[in-house]
Image: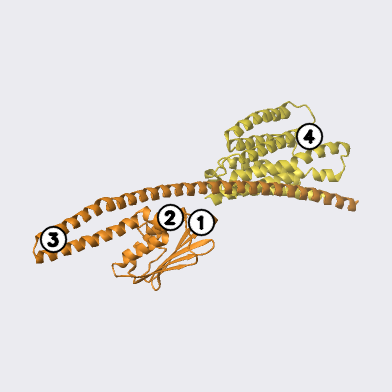
Amino acid sequence: MHEKASVEVLYFLIVFFLFSILIVGIIMYIILKYQQRRDLYYKNISDLKSEHENEILKAQIKVQEQTFQHIANEIHDNIGQKLSFAKLQLNVMQDFYNKHQQVIIQEIAEVITESLSDLRNLSRSLSLDFIANNGFIKAVENEIEKLNKSGLYQFKLIVQGDSQFLDLDQELMLFRIVQESLNNVVKHAQAKQILIKLHYTANILLVSIEDDGIGFDVNKKSNGSGLTNISKRAQSIGGSATIHSSTTTGTIVQIKIPLYESQKV
Amino acid sequence: MEMKIVQIILNLQCLAIFLSFFFSIKLYRLNWKNGMKYFSIYHFVAFIMAIPFFLMFNGFSKFSHLHEINNYTLLFGFLFLALFMIFNMPNKKGRQLLITLFIILFSLLIFNIFKNDLDKSVQNSQAFAINCFGLLIFSIIYFLKLFKVIPEKRITTDPTFWVVIGVFSFSIISSPLLIVTGFFYKIDPVNRFLILVGLMPSLGFITLHFFLIKAILCTKKLQ
């Protein structure tokens, strides 16, 4: 009798155990399924948000490029033309003045020539045409040449690996990042030496801009939008940007851009 | 031995009810703020109703109107939990469906309790079965609708979710065995295994009240 009672209690416990497993299973299933849906929902929202931000950034960059192009055209076609005409006039009027005055006119003509050269460089660095016709590396060389004229910095450009053509948007964006970084160095770094490295590997292009300046605290929020612009621009062409800086070693801006099969020459 | 188990489980049921009442009183203000506004009423009624049962299980007193108390408790429990799920239904369509079901099931329950001429214990089991199946359907509809709305909520910290889980567990533990037990009990009333299985609703109540405590404690996380 006692043994029978024990068996019945055992049955009872088994039944309850099975029900408990069933309930726990159902609860786990509901929570997991819901959590999966929730994760997917928030992932979709964040994808949409970043897609939207990307679209806005692209539109901003497009407007900026159009403005740059307009300024470049104005420099080349309007200001450049006027200065060339002024230089021509000076050359013509040189014959009507005495020797001392001719020297002064010659000096003015030289200043105009220098200004014309500077403006041509500026026009090149703003214009899309230069980069489209000559490529990214040539544009960077041109930028270095422009800054070298000040004599304040020592530039070095190193190209490693087999250089590859990127599509025009990527090249333009990369060039703008280099420009922005160089602009930051000139404005804030108090550097003497600037090294620009372009490292082409099979799948990635690594661009780094290094200086030996005073550095800054990367985690500190700055008022300017330069660093944010660099990151956003890199992201807009599927790349990423990292910035390392210290007061002892200066600043390194590194851009990583994926290279696709179609871009390889 | 099985009588000892019966005694333990029935006392555990009362203990779970007392505990959930204690937590609901302790976190009353938080519950009020976080979607469990009137839930303390449920705990209070459950507490009051559990006292005579607790006294009876432990041999302190004998009540002659236990079936009536049971019926009114069932009626109140169904009314409260069904309305809670209707008000917390995630979408409008589901709410309308629940209201329709509620009207049908509640009428059936009232009819069963007040107009049924059957034997008191049979009538009581029928009312309990309507209550369990009704709440089981309600909670299943809640879960189905939960997967159709925008999943913004974190359900593991949502008190309503744990209340519905509690109701679902209670119904799923109680409903099927209750029917089978009733059927076999008529054939073999002395089978002790069936008496033990008949205790499943008590285990269902214990589970329900533990999930209600979980729901109450969730309001602390939402703070």
- Distance from disc 1 to disc 3, alpha carbons, whole Å, reads 54 Å
From the image, tell me which residue sits under label 1: A263
Q: Is residue B143 left or right of residue A261?
A: right
The chain under label 4 reads B
Q: Nearer the viewer, residue A186 or A69?
A: A69
- Distance from disc 3 to disc 4, alpha carbons, whole Å, reads 126 Å
Q: Residue at x 70, y 30 (%)?
A: B109
From the image, tell me which residue sits under label 3: A94
Colour representing chain A: orange
Q: Earlier in the sequence, mark 2 or mark 3?
A: 3
The amino acid on which the numbered mark 1 sits, given as a three-letter code, is Gln
Q: Earlier in the sequence, mark 1 or mark 3?
A: 3
* Disc nearest the viewer among 2 and 1: 1
From the image, tell me which residue sits under label 4: B121
Mark 3 secondary-structure assignment: helix
From the image, tell me which residue sits under label 2: A233
- Distance from disc 2 to disc 4, alpha carbons, whole Å, reads 77 Å
Q: Residue at x 45, y 57 (%)?
A: A234
Residue B83 % position (x, y): 61, 35
